[in-house]
Image (spheres, grey):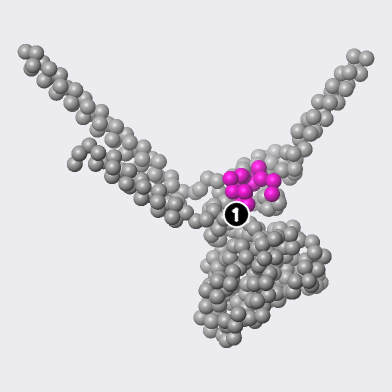
Amino acid sequence: MMAYRRYLLVAALAASLLLWALPAQAIAPEQMPTPQLEARYLALIHGFRCMQCQDESLADSPVNLAADMRREVRDMLLAGKSDEQIRDFMVSRYGYFILFKPPFVLKTAWLWLTPGILLLVGVIVALTVIRKRAALAATDLEDDDLTDA
Amino acid sequence: MNRFTIPLVAFALLVVVLAVGIRQSPDKDLIPSPLIGKPAPDFSLPSLTDPGQRVSSTQLRGHWFIFNVWGTWCYACREEHPMLLKIRQAGVIPVIGLDWKDDRGDALSFLKDEGDPYQSIAVDHDGSEAIMWGVYGAPESFLVDPQGIVVSKFIGPITEEQWRQQILPRLTMSAGAGSAAGSS
């Protein structure tokens, strides 16, 4: 009896695992022949934007176009293309918009540089304010000394 | 120069930067195509109307054409259909269709019922040709010049206004293009 129950439990667990695996398979049914290719494939499709549902990556998007584009990435990988070549191809068709991480080129330089510049400005402002306050505090102390005397 | 000057100037600058950003930010639904000014992708695909024949880019060299990506599953394409028929009637530029991930029977019966605006229709059964053109929705149309260069891209149904202001003038400007332009 106990053994029977245990089998039942195992079967139920296995079934729930299957259920859990189904939707995941619906999103990325493409299997790559080697773990290396699989890793590159996953890294690539996570880095591309789905052009229809723009805040999702190709890896996460359930729409047909994303499935077609994943297949395109997969075919290029299997054809021996480098990550660089695949990225260049996608950019040549869809523009930089397809990359979640925009490249550092002239057009996007401000995007990468502005946070650093703002931080620098903030540090400079903070330093001058601190210096001024320190100087002020020092003179205040001297004034106090004078009045006390 | 009092103590409010710097924060105020910084605030004003920020307002200007954000205002420009909002003004300049393109509609997220209209992503500019990197293909504009570049050669249109070469293709050779089976014809929808005659699967034995192929529709290829080499047949199209030397003429302006509109490359229209559509499908019977696409509602906006049905909206665009009368405009395409009008373009066909004007007779100054052929429309080449790319039937994108569609059912052949559906496509043929749709054209039979609603009229066929296309000079020829290529079939993109698995969606890989659409990716070559950077298509991300339908309908999308590309205006291609006689040298095979993509001149402009229209996302969504082509409007009367776009036809009059962005397509027709280009055709009449270039020598040899139809003299009967502007009949619509």
In the image, what residue occupies the spot 43% across and 55% down? B23
Residue A94 covered by magenta stretch: no
Work out whether B127 lies above or below A38: below
Which residue shows up at 68% across the image and 75% down it?
A: B85
Residue that carries the numbered disc 1 in the rendered image: A90
Q: Dot 1 surroundings within 10 Å: few (below 14), some, or many (20 or more)?
A: many
Asked if residue B45 can be seen in this view, the reply is no
Task: Report the magenta stretch's main SS.
Answer: loop
Judged from this view, the residue extending furthest toward the left is A149
Q: Position of residue A97 (x, y in %)?
A: 54, 52
Does the magenta segment cover residue A52?
Answer: yes
Question: Is B13 left or right of B54, judged from the image as shown?
Answer: left
State the image quarter where residue B59 is shown: bottom right
Q: Which residues are magenta?
A: A48-63
User: Where residue A60 sits in the image (x, y, percent)?
Assistant: 66, 42
Image vertical order of residue B176 relative to residue B83, above or below: below
Q: Amino acid at mark 1?
A: Met
Residue at coordinates 66% horizontally, 40% vertically from top-left? A39
